[in-house]
Structures are given as structure tokens and as C-alpha cells.
Amino acid sequence: MSTLSNNLLILVGAGSSLGMAIEDVCTAQKIDCHKISAKEISNFIKSEEDNSGPFEKFDFLCEELKILASKYKAANVILTHRVRIKNPLEAIKIELAISKDLILFLSSKFDSLKVTYIGSVTGGLVDRTSEESYHFTKDLQKSISRYLTITNYRIVSNVLTLSAFQKYSDENSSADYKRLVSKYQSKLGEIKLLEIRRIANEILRFTLLADGFRGCEIPLDSGYSIIQEKVI
């Protein structure tokens, strides 16, 4: 990957376990990783006035992006964020700002963007323990991805759908987490959960190299999501 001419990754939601794993892979691969806080954007939206402009919420990014845009003509973007607001309408408003408005803002700074949204199994299976806004916002990313790819020539965007994966090593796992992993593995037999670093590496590799995919939703786990829906 270090031979690619475009080695800039913009990471949204870097505080998540998956975001941190992607950042670690970037460091190992010598890829310039610039982090944007989804929480900062969310906080602005919750306090903004109705007369604010469409991009004013991103003013705090302008100086850093100006420097990056002078060095890189194109950028890769991975969004691992999750909107943690119970009110569905408020969550959708924030998701639109992060997944659509932010990407349009970034496209005004770079000649082209390759964007990967990290989806979830909720497209085929509703986890009743998660708040309803989680399902709505994750499904919304699929529509946004297709819309941006079709309507903006600067943007190529896709959704990688994930389900369960192993976040922690056995040495660093709590008893509750080990029981959860054991549950998945007992249901799936010989199929093992993928480790988070491997998932992170595949997400990064897809974003950098998968030029032939546009507006697609792709199960990164080779159909594990479908198996989970049937047996768990």
C-alpha cells in the first residue's frame, strides 16, 4: 500500500474500537491518518440555530483540511461512527450531517474522494437490544452512499456491512466477553469470529484499492451476517 500515490485517510469515529484498529493499521502501513470527531459535529448540530449555513458546522476543520488539500489531491474516507441518540428524528438529522454534509464538504476540498461507510448486520437482522435510532441511521448510510455516488462525480462511495467480530485478545478479555465469543462460536461451529485487526486491514485495503465498486453494499465477512441471521 505504501506505493500508492494517494496515502491520505480521513477517519471519522476514530474513538471506536474499530476506528482505533484502523488507525493502528495506517501507522503500520505509513498512511497519513487524519481524524475527525463525529461527536464534535453532533454537539454543534444539537446547539445550532436554524439560520446556520450548511457547512458552518465544519468551520473547525478548515485550517487542517487546507494543509492536507495542499499535499493531497484526493482523499480516502472511512466512517466508523455510531450516532448514540435515542430520539430517532434527532439521530437521523445528525447522521445526515455526518454521512452526507461532511462528505460533500470534504469533496469541495479535494479533487476526488473514495468513501467507505461501516454498516452493520441490521440491514438483515434487527437486534432488539439496540435502540431503534441505530437501525435507522445505519440503513440511512446505504441510501446516502448510493445518492452521493450517483449525483457527485468527485465521490465514489460504498458500504461495508459487518456483523460480530472479535474485538479483544483472549488475554485482555473479560469473563462476560469470553462468554459472548463462546456463544457465537458454539452457534457457528468451525466458523470463527474475525479479529478486529484483520477486519481493519481489509476495510482499509478495500477503501484504497476497490475502484470498481460504486454505491454498493458489500458483506465484508463473506456472508457471515447471513449465517448469523439464521442461527442466532
Image: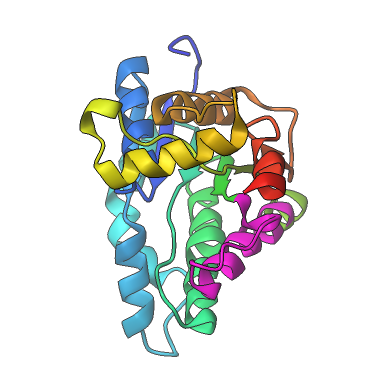
State left or right for residue 229 relative to residue 109.
right
Is residue 66 or residue 232 the one in the foreground? 232
What is the residue that sits farthest to the bottom in this orientation?
50
- Image coordinates of residue 128 in percent, x first then y, are 55, 68
State left or right for residue 208 relative to residue 218.
left
Q: Is residue 16 magenta?
A: no
Q: Is residue 135 magenta?
A: yes
State left or right for residue 36 relative to residue 220.
left
Q: What span is colored magenta in the figure?
A: 121-146
Report if residue 169 is visible in the image.
Answer: yes
Image quarter of residue 19:
top left
Image quarter of residue 137:
bottom right
- Image coordinates of residue 190 in percent, x first then y, are 59, 22
Residue at (64% x, 44% y) in the render: 228
Q: Main secondary structure of the magenta part?
A: helix
- Image coordinates of residue 36 in percent, x first then y, are 34, 51
Residue at (34% x, 38% y) in the render: 178
Is residue 194 or residue 7 the one in the foreground? 194
Image quarter of residue 46:
bottom left
Is residue 66 or residue 117 the one in the foreground? 117
- Image coordinates of residue 73 in percent, x first then y, are 49, 32
What is the residue that sits farthest to the top in this orientation?
3
